Amino acid sequence: MFGLCLDGDFILLKNRSMKTTIDIPEKAIKDAMRFAGATTKRAAILAAVEEFNGRHRMAMLTRHLGTCKDLMGVGELKRSRAEG
């Protein structure tokens, strides 16, 4: 495994992950582990980061709702399905 140390953070170049030390209150990490069904702190934090990123990706996508004029509306879709 090859790594690089910048500003005290060790960056793993092989799998493009980053090792860092952070101070998280014990209750917060225990709750995250319980909610994520995680058995390790790493898994809980990874689940939380993925959830956070997913929510923000969805928020970005919702900004485009209704901006495509070529797509069929709900009424048109229902009529099309009713007609067979």
Image: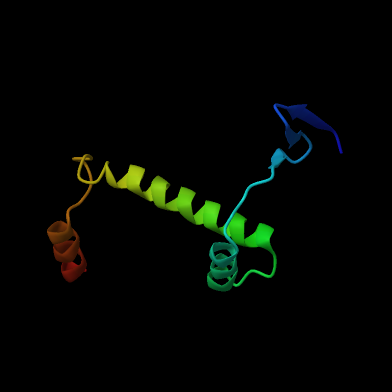
The tally of labels here is 0
Given residues 71 and 14, the one toward you in this image is 14
Given residues 53 and 30, the one toward you in this image is 30
- Against 47, is 20 above or below? above
Is 78 on the left or on the right of 4, as rendered? left
Q: Which residue is drawn at 70% across and 65% down?
A: 40
- Against 56, is 38 above or below? below
- Against 10, is 79 above or below? below
* In the image, farthest residue toward the top: 6
Q: Pinpoint residue 2: horizontal percent, then vertical percent.
A: 85, 33
Q: Which residue is drawn at 14% across and 57% down?
A: 76
- Against 45, is 83 above or below? below
Is 64 on the left or on the right of 49, as rendered? left
Which quarter of the picture shows residue 69?
top left
Q: Pinpoint residue 79: horizontal percent, then vertical percent.
A: 14, 64
Is 19 on the left or on the right of 61, as rendered? right
Q: In which quarter of the image is the C terminus?
A: bottom left
Q: Residue at x 27, y 41 (%)?
A: 64
Given residues 28 and 42, the one toward you in this image is 28
Q: Quadrant of the N terminus?
A: top right
Given residues 30 and 64, the one toward you in this image is 30
Q: Residue at x 69, y 45 (%)?
A: 21
Q: Pinpoint residue 20: horizontal percent, then vertical percent.
A: 69, 42
Q: Pinpoint residue 33: horizontal percent, then vertical percent.
A: 60, 68
Q: How is the image coloured?
A: rainbow
